[in-house]
Image: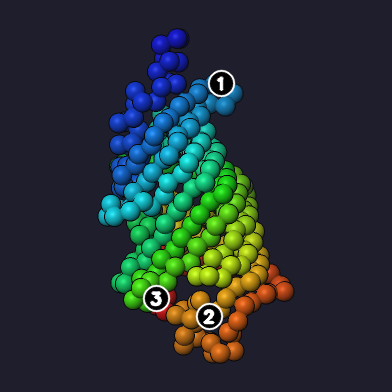
């Protein structure tokens, strides 16, 4: 068993197969710098990649890149073309979300969960450490409105009780020159496989401190008197029970 073990530890042997399979599943270009794997009877197959990059669909920029991406894969489902990632750990990932002037998100196709031939992908437990998420909204203004989350920590536990997972998120909220703090925790019920992710639901508490309402003026215009909301917000109570937006390719116009 020396030769298979050697080949498994050197994922460069299968680089083209791995990046092609991942690229076809995501409909995007996928690359990585180094990769290694380990196979045991107890833990199954574990994979680790460094400097993993997923390009945006239009190839204009990176959608996601991570310093280190680690995952554990269940073996038996692979026989029926199901890749179940029992655990995923992303270290210092950077996710770039965009909405164009027509109102379309750059991840709209991923949220629609369109069925494709080949292997299906399922996630169980996810941990994100020291993450960064930027959202640039071209529809909110000519120059685009940018909001970001830094120092992001996120944990999503494996689904239980009818495909419901517990989760928690903590991050620094960046609004131009202003900074606030975000804490979100609760449960996430994933929509059935045949339905878009937009039909999933949240039951959560949220706490925002140091939030600058003026930053969100394009979204609030016509819905609330901006003058009364101006300033920095320090909510005293958490906000509970929220529904994920049903339409994932279009957000409410600002």
Q: In this orientation, does residue 143 appear?
A: yes
In this view, the residue in front, 219 or 232, is: 232
Whole-number angstrom distance, CA of label 2 to CA of label 1 = 55 Å
Whole-number angstrom distance, CA of label 1 to CA of label 3 = 52 Å
Question: Does 228 sit left or right of 2 as displayed?
Answer: right
- Front disc: 1 or 3: 3
Q: Residue at x 53, y 43 (%)?
A: 91
Q: Residue at x 62, y 57 (%)?
A: 170
Would you place residue 109 above or below residue 121 in this image?
below
Judge the density around disc 3: few (<14), some (14-19), many (≥20) Cα neighbours within 10 Å: many
- Front disc: 3 or 2: 2
> How far across and how far down the image is residue 126, in percent?
55, 45
> How far across and how far down the image is residue 138, in percent?
36, 71
On residue 41, the disc is: 1
Q: Quadrant of the C terminus?
A: bottom left
Judge the density around disc 2: few (<14), some (14-19), many (≥20) Cα neighbours within 10 Å: some
Going from the N terminus, do you reach mark 1 or mark 3 first? 1
Question: Does 34 sit left or right of 213 as displayed?
Answer: left
Going from the N terminus, do you reach mark 3 or mark 2 first? 3
Count the numbered circles shown: 3
SS class of the residue under badge 3?
helix
SS class of the residue under badge 1?
loop
> How far across and how far down the image is residue 167, in percent?
62, 53
Going from the N terminus, do you reach mark 2 or mark 1 first? 1
On residue 140, the disc is: 3
SS class of the residue under badge 2?
helix
Residue marked by disc 2: 214
- Front disc: 2 or 1: 2
Would you place residue 94 above or below residue 215 in this image?
above
Whole-number angstrom distance, CA of label 3 to CA of label 2 = 13 Å
């Amino acid at each position: 068993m020396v030769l298979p073990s050697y080949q498994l530890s050197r994922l460069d042997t299968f680089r083209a197969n791995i990046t092609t399979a991942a690229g076809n599943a995501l409909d995007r270009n996928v690359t990585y710098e180094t990769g290694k794997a380990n196979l045991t009877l107890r833990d199954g197959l574990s994979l680790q990649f460094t400097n993993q990059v997923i390009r945006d669909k239009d190839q204009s920029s990176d959608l996601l890149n991570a310093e280190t991406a680690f995952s554990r894969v269940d073996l038996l489902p692979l026989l029926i073309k199901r890749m179940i990632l029992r655990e995923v750990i992303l270290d210092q990932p950077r996710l770039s979300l965009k909405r164009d002037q027509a109102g379309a998100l750059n991840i709209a196709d991923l949220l629609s969960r369109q069925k494709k031939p080949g292997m299906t992908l399922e996630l169980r437990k996810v941990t994100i450490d020291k993450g960064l998420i930027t959202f640039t909204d071209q529809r909110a203004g000519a120059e685009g409105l940018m909001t970001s989350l830094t120092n992001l920590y996120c944990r999503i536990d494996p689904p239980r009780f009818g495909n419901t997972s517990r989760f928690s998120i903590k991050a620094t909220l960046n609004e131009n020159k202003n900074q606030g703090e975000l804490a979100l925790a609760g449960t996430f019920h994933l929509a059935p496989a045949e339905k878009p992710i937009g039909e999933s639901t949240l039951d959560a508490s949220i706490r925002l401190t140091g939030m600058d309402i003026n930053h969100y003026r394009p979204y609030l215009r016509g819905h609330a008197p901006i003058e009364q909301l101006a300033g920095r917000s320090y909510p005293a109570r958490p906000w509970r029970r929220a529904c994920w937006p049903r339409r994932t390719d279009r957000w409410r116009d600002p």
